[in-house]
Amino acid sequence: MKVTIDRDRCIGAGQCVLAAATVFDQSDSDGRVVLLNSDPTADLAPDVTMAAALCPALVITVED
Amino acid sequence: MFRRVVIVGASAAGLTTAEALRRRGYDGTLTLVGDEPHAPYDRPPLSKQVLAGKWEPHKVVLRDDKALDDLGVELLLGHAADGLDTLGRRVLLAGGGTVDYDALVIATGVVPRRLLDTDLIGVHHLRTLDDALALRAQLLERPEQLVVVGAGFLGAEVAAVAREMGLDVTLVDPLPVPMLRQFGQRIGELIAQMHRDHGVSLCLGTGVSQFNQVGGRVTAVELADGSTIDADLVLVAVGAAPATGWLVGSGLSLQDGVECDARCQAGPGIYAAGDVASWYNPHFGVRMRLEHRMNATEQAIAVAGNLLGDDEPFAPVPYFWTDQYDTKIQAYGVFHPDAEFQLLSGDPSERRFTATYSKSGTVTGVLGWNSPRELLTLRQLVIDRTPLTSITAVG
């Protein structure tokens, strides 16, 4: 699974962190997303897919 | 099991319902009906990046053509729903035509409230992409004086964008501070000060009595106290009403939006999601209707689940935010007008702090002012219904 983010769009809502805390974090300075793991294992797929679906700014792209 | 799901409303809630159904394995037919000609797009950037010209308009599109194709959805764009026959299980379209359903999801959103004679040239509303582009075009004409009527989310954000473009802006509201209904007096005062610091003229505590005009073009806004403010451009941002006109006579209960139960169900095989849906939120023990972007997504996912038999109440902690100038205000929970406000950390004078809102001694909302990371952890206070007495204020 390949995860990419469009950090310019990020509004720092933090929904991705709530959905998949081992894959996403927020920066301390501006609250924007920090990608911790761009190639998460398959068992994280449901959480990462939910993070992408919940993101109100459509920042996260997930490819199989 | 439903085999023919029709979703009326092709914005965030409608599209997300379709995506969530497919993700969960629904392989029946899906029809998405939208009154605008545009493919589904996102609205929060309209009053921010799009209005400011920081984004090209196409950037608000929610999914590209390929993603929409892959979704396997019949897209009926440019078709407004005009009526609902619940016995025959069909949606009537404006200009004729019907769409049969087993299950219906109502996601028609809201329409801006109008004020006085708003057909005047120079008086704008902002809800759609076309509205945003029309207002943007007028801002680029460098009006001498923009008057924004209504200091809620939309009005305050547009005032900020226009000031950053160097325009003269007056923000008018009958309430004593901006965003009073959303965040109460204390935060309202801080927002008022922020706008003053950026050079916005605030005209608060007085409503608008009429628009003055010459030859059908607005020239001034007259206030209830008899004073007038010259204006060659006006944005009316006095809230929005649920888009339920097409449902009148359908038998559905339409008190404030489509009235649903805790599972977002409005009738047999009928659900609602997003701005148009009023439902009972068991976490807070109240009926609510939210015009927030995050709720459109969360409620749509919940509706998709319930369509597939989850039978789960929808009990979210609401999340919403606003961006004005370089300030981001974020909030989780509900913010009663009479809630007790308490600073939790940071300092308003340093433009970085968090605060709690509580009712009857229980935290119901947390707010962060330029504090996104900290606020995320405070969200738990709302989930846990934390007693105010157990929290130690730092600030």
Image (cartoon, coloured by chain):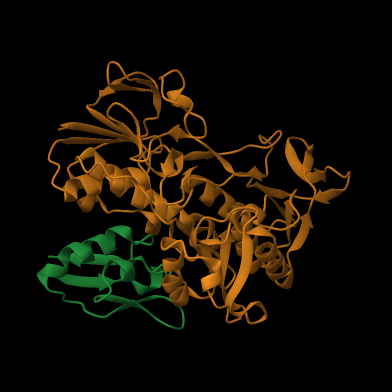
- In which quadrant is the C terminus of chain B drawn? bottom right
- In which quadrant is the N terminus of chain B drawn? top left
| Residue B87, image quadrant | top left
Q: Is residue B55 visible?
A: yes
| Residue A25, image quadrant | bottom left
Coordinates of residue A58 in the picture (x, y in percent): 33, 61
Q: Colour of chain B?
A: orange
Question: Which residue shows up at 44% across the image and 33% down it?
Answer: B259
Coordinates of residue B372 in the picture (x, y in percent): 46, 73
Q: Is residue B331 above or below residue B76?
A: below
Which residue reaches farthest right?
B226
Question: Which residue shows up at 36% across the image and 46% down it?
Answer: B13
Residue B20 located left or right of residue B296: left
Q: What is the letter of the green chain?
A: A
Query: Along the line of sight, which residue is nearer the eye, B39 or B20?
Result: B20
Residue A27 located left or right of residue B387: left
Residue A42 located left or right of residue B187: left
Q: Is residue B328 visible?
A: no
Q: Is residue B216 above or below residue B56?
A: above
Coordinates of residue B260 in the picture (x, y in percent): 40, 35
